[in-house]
Image (cartoon, grey):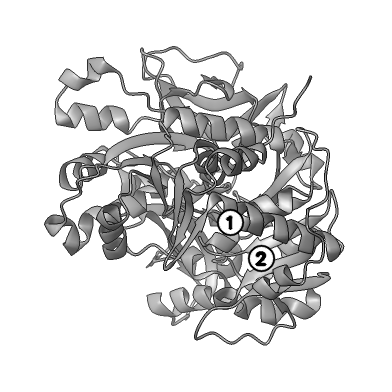
Amino acid sequence: MFTPLTPLDWKRRAVKYYPEKVAIIDEDKEFTYKEFGERTDKLAIALSEAGIKEGDHVAVMLPNTHYMLESFYGICQLGAVMVPLNYRISASDMEYIINHSDAKMLIVDEEFAAPIEEIVDNLSLEQIILVPVEGQKSSLKSIEYDSFLQHAKATTPPEVEIDENQLLTLNYTSGTTSKPKGVMQTHRSNYINAANFMNHLDVKHNDVYLHTLPMFHANGWGGVWAITAAGATHVCLRKVDPPLILDLFEQKGISLLCGAPTVVNMLVNDPKAKETKVTTKPRMGTAGSPPAAALIQKAQEILGLNMIHVYGLTETAPFILYCEWKSDFDSKSADDQATIKARQGIELAFNGETKVIRQDDGEEVAWNGEELGEIVTRGNVVMKGYYKDPEKTAEAIKDGWFHTGDLAVTHPDGYIEIRDRVKDLIISGGENISSTEVEGVLYKHPDVLEVAVIAVPNEKWGEVPKAIIVLKPDAKVSEQDIIDYCRDNMAHFKAPKEVEFVESLPKTATGKLQKFRLREMHWGSAKKVN
């Protein structure tokens, strides 16, 4: 009587009970759940006939379109593993990830095909499926997506017996190292996370969900599964466009969305926000970097958004905390309410145990809002490990606990609040940026003697990289020269937005760089490098 936990079963349920309901809205296209089910089945058949079998890996580099949603279900129902790719990373990182992941096939959007064209001769792919885009012309040797589906001969996809502990997706995160790490997520961990998404974001059958959050980010935080589970409607959004989003709120009756604080900031500061009356009062989950209390307050006052703060990591599928709202909070001032909503919060119902521990003895910190420790977690959503990297896995998972690397306090009511990061990770607009990776690029510049890269506050992106550089004697280079050099040698979003030239960098007596002293100059007492 045992039934494995897999989010794929929710597609079966949605097709069974809501066949004529609109499942997906993608610009001028609409698909019912019956049509969505048929298209995912066709994809599974076509993949199977192309040689993809259980356990094989298929890389996918697509924006938020119906093709991306179809890929999640069509690939995974074969027992194959989907490898969602961030289309913003550099060609060299794409090459590393595709080859490291052992992907046999790539499904790519034509708008993002250019970097693949640069590296295609170095890839071990057997086939490329291209989603055509009007106005784009790729030279990749490929087959068009819909043609690939139409050539499928079988009428039903292969039946595959799923083990809930087998891999569902392989999600790459650069973390704080120069080489991306492949996070192994299972059918079970995705199922449990999506159940948390449904429960704590209060997903209902009549919800209309706007995919502002990239689906490649930890599988849309679970939204790709949870919305289908409820039989709600997915509204696809190819890129974040604040005026369009504000229009869609009313045009499509958007009731729920998710996004990093930078997206919230873009919405509230768009000129159209002041003249837009949002009657649907959407709920919005936000995470990626801790949102400022003032930003939450603006979102609620200007747009009427009901902000829900969640916290997690790709390694935890991703949710492990959410800021549960209690009726006791309703009597507090707007400022106090926003301050509470900026906290990471408490454990979700299904993920397992999360706490803050002292780094010296591993005991839980006092619930006093002052004692600092590291957030650790264990339970149903923690990754299987890093793909082909047992050493990094052992570093992250110790004695059965996953160590997040985030420093936090626990308030008297049990609510956890991040105060700093153990490592020097920069999160800009929801994207992870390794400071050491940027430093590594800058050290190759002929005029750079020493460099430290830190996060500095930024109104639009939350925080951005800043390079603090000691130049070689007689070097003549400008701030813009440094920025341009970085943009030429790495993904643009990773490049420093600011550069400062100094005579020396603060160090310990043993020569170790003291980045915290540099951060204090920019963050002051808050010093939240998240």
Q: Helix, strand or loop at disc 1?
A: helix
Residue 141 location, x and y as percent?
75, 83
Query: What type is the residue that disc 2 sits on?
Result: Asp
Is residue 173 visible to the viewer in this orientation of the structure?
A: no
Residue 342 location, x and y as percent?
32, 34
Seen from the viewer's position, the closer of residues 529 and 258 is 258
Q: Is residue 435 above or below residue 448?
A: above
Is residue 107 visible to the viewer in this orientation of the structure?
A: yes
Upstream in sequence: badge 2 or badge 1: 1
Q: Is residue 409 left or right of residue 17?
A: left
Q: Is residue 408 above or below residue 153?
A: above
Q: Point out the frontmost of discs 2 and 1.
A: 1
What residue sits right under mark 1 in the picture? 35
Q: Helix, strand or loop at disc 2?
A: helix
Q: Is residue 523 left or right of residue 298?
A: right
Total labels drawn: 2
Residue 3 found in image quarter: top right
What residue is at 60 percent from the left and 35 percent from the top? 316
Query: What type is the residue that disc 1 sits on?
Result: Glu
Q: Quadrant of the N terminus?
A: top right
What residue sits right under mark 2 in the picture? 93
Residue 53 found in image quarter: bottom right
Residue 359 location, x and y as percent?
58, 23
Seen from the viewer's position, the closer of residues 503 and 159 is 159
Pointer 1 local density, CA inside 10 Å: few below 14, some 14–19, many at least 20: some
Residues at marks 2 and 1, CA–CA distance in whole angstroms = 35 Å
Seen from the viewer's position, the closer of residues 44 and 304 is 44
What residue is at 63 percent from the left and 77 percent from the top? 115
Q: Quadrant of the C terminus?
A: top left
Q: Is residue 101 above or below residue 398?
A: below
Q: Is residue 85 left or right of residue 256?
A: right
